[in-house]
Image (tube, helix red, strand yellow):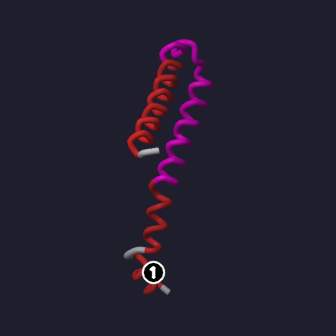
Amino acid sequence: MTPLISSIISISIILVGTTIGSLFVFFIKKEISDKFSSIILGFAGGVMMAAAFFGLLLPAINESSNGIYKDIKEYDD
């Protein structure tokens, strides 16, 4: 599979998921209780924190242990 086809398929999956999520909100936004809304927001916050950690911070920590900060850590010992 070429990178172009892979990109088109990936973008299509993201588009469909976003569309389904937005339709869910548009059709039942007046029927959601405060408790259910809090649960959804908590879950979304947890997903975003996990994405930030595993997608951004964890690779940065790994790079810092192999990159320029390796020399600094040697002087700390």
Q: In the image, what residue type sits under mark 1?
A: Lys
Quadrant of residue 4 within the rendered picture: top left
Magenta stretch contains residue 17: no
Range drawn in magenta: 26-55
Residue 75, image x, y percentages: 43, 86
Between 5 and 54, which is closer to the camera in this rendering? 5
Q: How many marks?
A: 1
Using the image, determine if residue 47 lies above or below residue 67: above
- Label 1 sits on a secondary structure element that is helix
In the drawing, does residue 32 fall left or right of residue 76? right
Residue occupying the point 61% across, 24% down:
36
Residue occupying the point 60% across, 19% down:
33
Residue occupying the point 42% across, 45% down:
2
Residue 18, image x, y percentages: 47, 28
Using the image, determine if residue 8 lies above or below residue 56: above
Between 13 and 5, which is closer to the camera in this rendering? 5
Q: Does the magenta stretch mainly form a helix, a strand or a loop? A: helix
Residue occupying the point 57% across, 30% down:
40
Residue hosting label 1: 73
